[in-house]
C-alpha cells in the first residue's frame, strides 16, 4: 500500500515572549497554555496572509518549545457586554499577573504548499498570543509529508480521538468565526485535546495513531508531526 503523501511548507517562527491565554481563567493570575491552541495558529497564518484564513483552506501541525517561563505584572482594560456589545467596565482598569514563555520557537507545518508565498512576504507581523508578543519568520521550506502510523513527535496539541498519548487534557475552540465589528467572535467548534508540553531537553514522545506524518526535512528518521483535521471540515484540503 502506498502511503499518503502531502506537499506542504515548513515555517520556523521565533520571538522573545509568548502567552497563550487559558480560556477557563477569567480573573486572577493568567496562566498560559503550555503550547499554542489552533486558534492561535490560525491567527498567525491569517496575519501573514493579511486576511482571515479559514480552516477549510489549510491543515496545520506544529512543534513548540521555549527556553523558560516567568510572571509579569500588567495593567488591564476590563470590558463588559452591554446589550450584546463590548464596552469598557465601569470599574475601570485593573492589575493582574500573567505567565509568559521566554524565547518561544514554533515549527509550523502547513498544507497546501501554495501557502508558502504568504510566509515569504507576510502582510502583517505574526504574534505569539498577545499583540506585544512580536514574532519573526526564520525560514520557509517546501516539504513532503508522508503518513505514518507511529512516530516521535515534539511538544504539540493533538485531538484525543486521533492519537493515544499521555498529556494535559484541554477543551479548546478549534477556530473562531469573525462576526460584525464590535461583536464577540463565536467559536466555530470546540474539541477535546491533549497537550504534550515542551521539555528543557526537547524530549520527543513516541505515539501511535492517525494524522501522523514524517516530514522530508525531519532531523530523525522516526520523527513525526501531527497534522490536525478540523471538526466538520475534513476533506476540503
Image (spheres, helix red, strand yellow):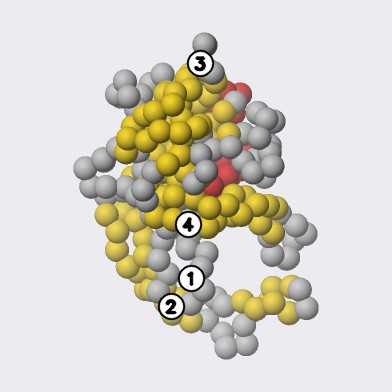
Q: CA distance from mark 1 to mark 4?
A: 13 Å
Dot 2 or dot 4: first in sequence order is 2
| Distance (Cα) linking label 1 and label 2 | 8 Å
Residue 170 has which mark?
4
Q: Residues within 10 Å of mark 4 (few under 14, many from 20)?
A: many
Pick whichever, 161 or 144, lies toward us.
161
Give the alpha-carbon distance from disc 2 to disc 4, as whole Å.
20 Å
User: Residue, x 35% and y 69% (percent of image)?
Assistant: 72
Q: Quadrant of the C terminus?
A: top right
Q: Which secondary structure lies at badge 2?
A: loop
Instruction: Name the outermost residue toward the bottom.
Output: 91
**Labels 4 and 3: the sequence-earlier one:** 3
Closer to the chain start, of discs 1 and 3, is 3
Q: Earlier in the sequence, mark 1 or mark 4?
A: 1
Q: Which of labels 2 and 4 is toward the front?
A: 4
From the top left corner, tell me how far across and down residue 59 is, in percent.
58, 34
Q: Residue tagged by mark 3? A: 3
Question: In the rendered image, which quarter is residue 97 located in?
Answer: bottom left
User: Mark 1–mark 3 contact, CB under 8 Å?
Assistant: no
Q: Which residue is mark 2?
A: 28
Residue in view at x 51 percent, y 74 percent: 26
Q: What separation in Å lies between label 1 and label 3 (alpha carbons)?
A: 42 Å
Residue positioned most to the left: 201
Measured Cα–Cα span from mark 2 to mark 3? 49 Å
For the residues bearing labels 1 and 2, Cβ distance under 8 angstroms: yes
Whether 99 is drawn above or below 46: the answer is below
| Crowd band around label 2 with a 10 angstrom C-alpha radius: few (<14), some (14–19), many (20+) | few
- Number of the front mark, 1 or 3: 3
Marks 2/4 in contact by CB < 8 Å: the verdict is no
Q: Is residue 207 visible?
A: yes
Amino acid at each position: 500500500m502506498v502511503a499518503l503523501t502531502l506537499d506542504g511548507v515548513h515555517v520556523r517562527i521565533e520571538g522573545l515572549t509568548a502567552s497563550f491565554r487559558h480560556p477557563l481563567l477569567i480573573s486572577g493570575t493568567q496562566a498560559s497554555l503550555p503550547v499554542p491552541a489552533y486558534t492561535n495558529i490560525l491567527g498567525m497564518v491569517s496575519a501573514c496572509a493579511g486576511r482571515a484564513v479559514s480552516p477549510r483552506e489549510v491543515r496545520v501541525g506544529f512543534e513548540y518549545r521555549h527556553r523558560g517561563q516567568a510572571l509579569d505584572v500588567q495593567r488591564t482594560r476590563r470590558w463588559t457586554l452591554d446589550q450584546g456589545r463590548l464596552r469598557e467596565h465601569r470599574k475601570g482598569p485593573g492589575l493582574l499577573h500573567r505567565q509568559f514563555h521566554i524565547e518561544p520557537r514554533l515549527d509550523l507545518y502547513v498544507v497546501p504548499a501554495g501557502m508558502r508565498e504568504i510566509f515569504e512576504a507576510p502582510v502583517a507581523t505574526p504574534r505569539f498570543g498577545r499583540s506585544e508578543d512580536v514574532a519573526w519568520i526564520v525560514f520557509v521550506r517546501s516539504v513532503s509529508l508522508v503518513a505514518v502510523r507511529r512516530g516521535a513527535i515534539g511538544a504539540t496539541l493533538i485531538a484525543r480521538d486521533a492519537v493515544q498519548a499521555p498529556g494535559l487534557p484541554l477543551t479548546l475552540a478549534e477556530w473562531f468565526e469573525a462576526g460584525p465589528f464590535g461583536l464577540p467572535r463565536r467559536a466555530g467548534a470546540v474539541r477535546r485535546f491533549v497537550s504534550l508540553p515542551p521539555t528543557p531537553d526537547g524530549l520527543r514522545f513516541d505515539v501511535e495513531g492517525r494524522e501522523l506524518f514524517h516530514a522530508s526535512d525531519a532531523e530523525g528518521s522516526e520523527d513525526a508531526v501531527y497534522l490536525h483535521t478540523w471538526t466538520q471540515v475534513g476533506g476540503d484540503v
